[in-house]
Every structure is written in C-alpha cells, then in structure tokens.
Image (cartoon, rainbow, N blue to C red):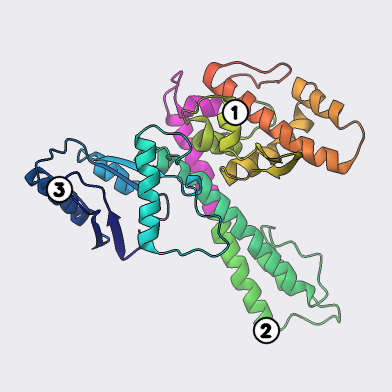
C-alpha cells in the first residue's frame, strides 16, 4: 500500500490463477474488485460466503480495516516484523513478491498454524483519539528542548552561558545581554533569538493547553468503576506517578486486552532476546520490538519509583541485586525493575491488586 496505488493479490476458489491487480488508493475500488472476484467465483460454481483481507501495518493505520469490517469483510492488519523473510544477504524484493509472502503468511494464520504471522489489534476511533494528546505533548516537549538548545548554542558562540530561555521575561532580558567582549548582541543574531523565543512561547502555550484539556476531561468524566478514566485515576494515585505517565500507560498499554504479565512486558519491549545455538547461549539484551513510548516511560518511571517508593518490595528487590554498586549492574537491573513495575501497575489497573509496600495517595 502506497499513497498513490495499492497492489491486491488474492486466492479465489474456482480460479486457475492467483489474480494480481493494481488499483488507485481507493477503498471503493478495492471493495468493487472483491465483489467482482466473488461474482466470478460464483459463475465458476464456487460460492464464497466469507471474504478475508489483510494488509501490513503502516502509514495508513487502521481506517481501511474498520471501513471494510463495516461492509461485512473480515479485515486484519499484519504486524510487519512478524512475517518471516528470506535470510539471504541479497534477495529479490518487489511488490509482487511481497504480496505473495504476505498472502502465504495470512493463509497459514487463517488455518490456525503457529508462527506464520501476528495480527495487530485494530483500535476503535475513540481509542486512537485518546492517544493523541499524550503523543502530541511528547512531540511538543521534544520541540521545546530543541528550541532551548538552539538558543543556548547561539549564545555560546558569544561567550554567554548563563541566559535561561525558559524564564517568563526572557525576551526583555535578551536586550540587556552582553557578549564576552562587553558588546551588545549583533542585530541579526538578536532578531533570530527573538523569533526562537516567540516560537518557544507558542510551543509552551500548546503544552499547557493539552495539559489543561486533559484535566478538564478527567474532571468531567463520570466516576465509573471501569474504563480508561478510572484506570488513570487509580494509577495516578501511586506515589511517584504523575497524570502524564498515567495517561500514557493507560492509553498505550493498560487498556489493551492482553493475556498476562508476560504479554504486557513483551508489548513494551522489556523482555530479553536470548540467542541459543548448540553450546552457545547468550543474551542479546532488550528485544525492543514493542511500544517505544511505553518502554522509555517505564524506564524513567523505574528510576523515579526508587525515590518515592523506597520501602516497597520492588525497591528493596532492586537494592539487594545492585549491592555491588557497579553501574552496569544498575543499568541492567533497572530494566528488570521497569518490567516488574509495569506488570504490577497492570494488575493494579485491572484487578485492583496493590503490590506490597507501594504507597497510594488518598482518593480524591
């Protein structure tokens, strides 16, 4: 699937060949093609009662799968990294070969065979929309850091290292800055810095708008016992967990219907990647095949958890295994703590089970 064209391959009962058709990126044209193939199969004496369609997850997201399901077509989205490919160093790769590979994996999955491929859970429109504020805020925070670093880099070329761009009256103080030689900033440089500060102000205003909007939605939401808002309120009660982290965890992972704690850790990419062949056995580190936002957020939360939950069993477990004081041990074990903490938060959000020693804020 590209922005301009889609390549559709199929296995149709009654056809001696496997049809391959290139279409414009148009859902109506795709549905018309599927119905045409079903009609031709009926003419050949083979009745088709079910149409199953799959495509690889990518830029287009899940709208097409939802659209097809509304029109009685079983639509699935294949996880791209779950499809086995040839291990040759140089292999032929064309759209036709890719569709054949996906079709073989999809048919094997439909037969119930293991290890052919994995399907991505198709979220609803509301679930996708709930993730947008936290993801947008993350992008804005990154942009804010980039602008601040750019301002500091410009000033460092003039020997100025004490200016703080995040101050409220930063633009006024900019007029009084002097270079290391005691001169005022050059005109073009000062104008450029003013534009950066104006851009920084817009970014910070948008961040505040997102945060205030989330708090308003949380306050207006009914105090139900289940649902994402109830999970968010419960997770935010854990000392050391803020509303931003709770929002990210609930909408990215905790509200998903995952099987058990191992599936939760695997989704976050916090599980290991063992390499075993004959007598050789080694660990290659984190798999990093899951949600990068959850993985990064949980590792940061694990360090914060050690400060705010010193008496918890998880914190004591971490200290017991890092008693040697080696930095490499702490770096390894903080990932293990992040994995255990994520599973503990999942149990708290789904069953209300509180891990031993974890302190909760009073319910508001």
Residue 105 is situated, as x and y percent measured from the top left of the image, at 40, 44
Residue 331 is situated, as x and y percent measured from the top left of the image, at 80, 41
Residue 49 is situated, as x and y percent measured from the top left of the image, at 17, 35
228 part of magenta stretch: yes
Q: Nearer the viewer, mark 2 or mark 1?
A: 1
Labels 3 & 1 near each other (Cβ < 8 A): no
Q: Give the residue drawn at x 72%, y 74%.
A: 154
Label 2 vs 1, first from the N-terminus: 2
Residue 55 visible at all: no
Q: Nearer the viewer, residue 356 or 157?
A: 356
Residue tagged by mark 1?
262
Q: What secondary structure is the stretch in magenta mostly built from? A: helix
The span shown in magenta is: 206-233
Task: Please state if 109 lies on the left or on the right of 329 as rendered.
Answer: left
Residue tagged by mark 2?
187
Q: Nearer the viewer, mark 3 or mark 1?
A: 3
* The quadrant where residue 75 appears: top left
Label 3 vs 1, first from the N-terminus: 3
Label 3 vs 2, first from the N-terminus: 3
- Quadrant of the image containing the N terminus: bottom left
* The quadrant where residue 272 appears: top right
> Taking 192 as reference, is 80 above or below it?
above
Q: Give the residue drawn at x 45%, y 35%.
A: 217
Q: Nearer the viewer, mark 3 or mark 2?
A: 3
Residue 136 is situated, as x and y percent measured from the top left of the image, at 51, 51
Residue furthest right as drawn: 324
Q: Give the residue drawn at x 68%, y 58%.
A: 166
264 part of magenta stretch: no
Task: Please state if 157 lies on the left or on the right of 51 as rendered.
Answer: right
């Amino acid at each position: 699937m590209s922005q301009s064209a889609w390549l559709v391959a199929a296995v149709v009962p009654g056809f001696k060949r496997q049809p391959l058709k290139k279409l414009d990126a148009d859902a109506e044209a795709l549905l018309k093609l599927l119905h045409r193939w079903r009609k031709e199969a009926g003419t050949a004496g083979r009745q088709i009662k079910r149409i199953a369609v799959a495509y690889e997850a990518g830029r287009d997201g899940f709208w097409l799968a939802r659209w097809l399901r509304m029109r009685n077509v079983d639509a699935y989205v294949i996880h791209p990294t779950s499809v086995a490919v040839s291990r040759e160093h140089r292999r032929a790769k064309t759209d036709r070969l890719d569709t054949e590979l996906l079709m073989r994996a999809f048919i094997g999955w439909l037969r119930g065979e293991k290890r052919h491929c994995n399907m991505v859970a198709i979220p609803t429109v509301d679930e996708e929309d709930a993730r947008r504020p936290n993801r947008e805020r993350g992008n804005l925070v990154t942009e804010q850091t980039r602008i601040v670093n750019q301002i500091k880099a410009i000033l460092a070329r003039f020997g100025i290292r004490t200016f703080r761009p995040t101050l409220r009256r930063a633009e006024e103080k900019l007029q009084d800055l002097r270079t290391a030689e005691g001169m005022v900033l050059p005109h073009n440089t000062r104008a450029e810095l003013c534009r950066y500060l104006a851009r920084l102000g817009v970014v910070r205003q948008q961040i505040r708008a997102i945060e205030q909007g989330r708090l308003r939605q949380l306050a207006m939401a009914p105090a139900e016992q289940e649902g994402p808002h109830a999970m968010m309120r419960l997770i935010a009660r854990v000392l050391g967990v803020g509303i931003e982290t709770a929002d990210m965890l609930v909408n990215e992972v905790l509200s998903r219907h995952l099987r058990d704690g191992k599936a939760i850790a695997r989704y976050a990419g916090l599980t290991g990647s063992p390499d075993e062949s004959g007598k050789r056995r080694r660990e290659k580190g984190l798999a990093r095949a899951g949600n990068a936002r959850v993985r990064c957020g949980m590792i940061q939360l694990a360090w914060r958890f050690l400060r705010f939950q010193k008496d918890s069993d998880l914190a004591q477990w971490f200290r017991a295994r890092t008693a040697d004081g080696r930095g490499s041990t702490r770096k390894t074990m903080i990932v293990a703590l992040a994995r255990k903490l994520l599973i503990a938060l999942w149990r708290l959000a789904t069953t209300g089970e509180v891990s031993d020693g974890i302190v909760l804020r009073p319910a508001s």
